[in-house]
Image (cartoon, rainbow, N blue to C red):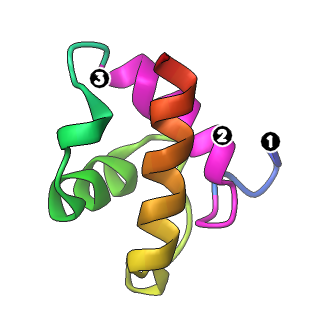
Amino acid sequence: MNTNAGLKWTDVQDIAVELAEHHPEVDPQYVNFPDMHQWICQLREFSDDPQRSNEKILEAIQAAWIEEVS
């Protein structure tokens, strides 16, 4: 993880790890993208422009999160 600049949308795996740690009760298979987007933007380590995300990025994060908890 690039700790100097914080998490960016391209840090898919690192974001997935953070989401798994912050939301252990959640099954990532069933998270909707608006909720996930909000949770990512609320991560203390996140420092990217919220408007730069898109469905492809969120799908990649969701897939990495599923892999992280399985």
Q: Are marks 3 and 2 in contact (CB under 8 Å)?
A: no
47 is within the stretch colored magenta: no
Q: Amino acid at mark 1?
A: Met
Residue drawn at the location 21% of the way across and 14% of the way down: 25
Range covered by the magenta-colored residues = 8-23
Q: Is residue 19 above or below residue 52?
A: above
Between the residue at mark 3 and the residue at mark 2, the CA separation in whole angstroms equals 14 Å
- Say few, some or many: other residues with alpha carbon within 10 Å of mark 1 (under 14 / 14 to 19 / 20 or more): few
Residue drawn at the location 66% of the way across and 40% of the way down: 14
- Say few, some or many: other residues with alpha carbon within 10 Å of mark 2 (under 14 / 14 to 19 / 20 or more): some
- Examine the image and state in which quarter residue 60 appears: bottom right
Q: Which residue is mark 2?
A: 14
Give the quadrant of the N terminus: top right
27 left or right of 45 in image: left
Q: Are marks 2 and 1 in contact (CB under 8 Å)?
A: yes
Q: Which residue is mark 1?
A: 1
Q: Are marks 1 and 3 in contact (CB under 8 Å)?
A: no
Most prominent secondary structure in the magenta stretch?
Answer: helix
Q: Which mark is residue 23?
A: 3
52 left or right of 33 in image: right
Q: Secondary structure at mark 3?
A: loop
18 is within the stretch colored magenta: yes
